[in-house]
């Protein structure tokens, strides 16, 4: 399973490759199934929860509040679930990213 630290290391490795090379970096190797966390940012935390539940169905997802902006306008939620393969991981990402109530998905 890919840990948060492994994901961070892979991202840092890609940044280094992008700065030091004209070649495309290799995709990080992710062993599936694995626990994956999406960070979802938008204005209405209750609506975000419903959107996350719908996008991740039928998988069980744990949703936790991550942060609220200093003026209280934006909220970020973490959505943690086990993804079976890259197709499922990307499909959930696309569903979240395309929803008009979601400003950012990480």
Image: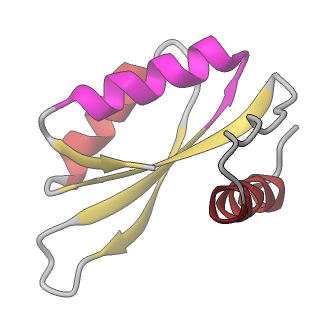
Name the chief secondary structure element in magenta: helix
Residue nearest the observer in this picture, 92 or 46? 92
Q: Is residue 83 magenta?
A: yes
Per the rendered image, the range of residues in magenta is: 81-99
Outermost residue toward the bottom in this view? 70
Please indicate, yes or no, whether residue 56 appears anywhere in the rendered image.
no
Query: In the shown orientation, is residue 17 left or right of residue 81?
Result: right
**Which percent across, then down, holds residue 74?**
19, 66
- Picture residue at 12% right of the left edge, 34% below the top: 100
Q: Residue furthest front?
A: 22
Q: Residue at x 15, y 53 (%)?
A: 44
Q: Quadrant of residue 43?
A: bottom left
Count of marks, rendered view: 0
Q: Is residue 68 magenta?
A: no
Q: Quadrant of residue 31?
A: top right
Q: Is residue 8 above or below residue 40?
A: below
Residue 59 percent location from the top left of the image = 57, 19
Asked whether the viewer can see residue 38, the reply is yes
Up-down relation of residue 14 to residue 12 (above or below): above
Q: Position of residue 41 (x, y in %)?
A: 30, 55
Q: Nearer the viewer, residue 6 or 44?
A: 6
Quadrant of the drawing holding the N terminus: top right
Question: Which colouring convention does the figure follow?
Answer: secondary structure
Q: Is residue 92 above or below residue 12?
A: above
Vertical side of 3 occupied by 88: above or below: above
Compared across the picture, whether 93 is left or right of 104 comes to right
Residue at 32% x, 41% y is 49
Q: Nearer the viewer, residue 7 or 12?
A: 12
Q: Is residue 54 left or right of residue 5?
A: left
């Amino acid at each position: 399973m890919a840990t948060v630290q492994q994901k961070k290391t892979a991202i840092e490795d890609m940044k280094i490759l992008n700065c030091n090379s004209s070649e495309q970096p290799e995709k990080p190797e992710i062993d599936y199934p694995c626990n994956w966390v999406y960070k979802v940012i938008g204005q209405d935390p209750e609506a975000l929860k419903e959107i996350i539940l719908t996008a991740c169905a039928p998988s069980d997802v744990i949703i936790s509040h991550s942060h609220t902006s200093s003026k209280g306008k934006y909220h970020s939620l973490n959505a943690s679930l086990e993804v079976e393969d890259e197709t499922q991981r990307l499909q959930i990402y696309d569903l979240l990213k395309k929803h008009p109530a979601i400003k950012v998905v990480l």
